[in-house]
């Protein structure tokens, strides 16, 4: 009986942990070509989130405080969301995806800052960029950034 209770607790804990990485109910794409097509079809700008999901503490905090918030979920409807992850662990993304992400980092995150948010027009021109997240965990700058992009487009 103790083994069953322990197994059940382990399963529930694993489920809770895996849901934490979910980025709420948002549709984050990982393929740039797909994001481009969706941007043209929907006439929405692309919002790229550059993250180091397994090593960047500010990225993890920004995900929790900003991207997983209900307030951002409402604003996300105005964007095509693209997640560009550069993890250190080799089992989190495929080698092919890592190579594609390196190309995007070189082109749109040349300073190499993490976390970094870049907004692109349908023509793939940078229309805004916001880098970093402080230990104070204030999301005001991030909401002002997405609001400004929404107003323009």
Image (spheres, grey):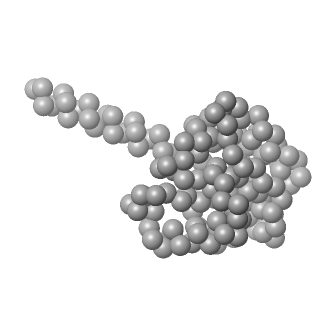
Q: Residue furthest front?
A: 111
**Image quarter in which the C terminus is found:** bottom right
Quarter-wise, where is residue 42 in the image? bottom right
Question: Which residue is at a point 75% across and 49% down the rendered structure image?
Answer: 130
Question: Does residue 16 appear left or right of residue 125 in this picture?
Answer: left
Most extreme residue toward the right is 152
In the image: residue 32, left or right of residue 40 = left
Q: On screen, 5 above or below 60?
A: above
Q: Visible in this render: residue 44?
A: no
Q: Nearer the viewer, residue 131 or 65?
A: 131
- Residue 99 percent location from the top left of the image: 53, 73
Judging depth in this view, the residue of 9 and 104 nearest the camera is 104
Picture residue at 39% right of the left edge, 36% below the top? 16
Name the one closer to the observer, 111 or 54.
Answer: 111
Work out whether 107 lies above or below 45.
Answer: below
The percent coordinates of residue 7 (x first, y second) are 20, 35
Q: Is residue 150 left or right of residue 137?
A: right
Residue 51: % across, % down: 59, 53
Residue appearing at x 85%, y 46% in the figure: 148
Give above or below for 84 relative to 107: above
Q: How many labels were placed on the picture? A: 0
Q: Quadrant of residue 6?
A: top left
User: Which percent across, then down, holds residue 3?
Assistant: 12, 31
Residue 85 in view, yes or no: yes
Q: Quadrant of the N terminus?
A: top left
Residue occupying image coordinates x 70% and y 32%: 138
């Amino acid at each position: 009986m103790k083994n069953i209770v322990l197994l059940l607790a382990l399963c529930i804990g694993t489920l809770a942990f895996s849901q934490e990485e979910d980025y709420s109910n948002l549709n984050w794409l990982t393929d740039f070509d797909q994001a481009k097509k969706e941007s043209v079809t929907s006439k929405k700008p692309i919002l790229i989130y550059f993250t180091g999901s397994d090593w960047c503490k500010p990225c993890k905090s920004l995900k929790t405080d900003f991207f997983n918030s209900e307030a951002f979920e409402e604003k996300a409807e105005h964007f095509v969301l693209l997640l560009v992850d550069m993890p250190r662990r080799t089992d989190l993304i495929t080698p092919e995806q890592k190579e594609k992400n390196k190309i995007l980092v070189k082109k749109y995150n040349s300073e190499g800052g993490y976390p970094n948010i870049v907004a692109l027009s349908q023509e793939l021109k940078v229309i805004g960029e916001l880098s970093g997240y402080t230990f104070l965990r204030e999301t005001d700058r991030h909401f002002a950034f997405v609001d400004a992009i929404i107003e323009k487009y």
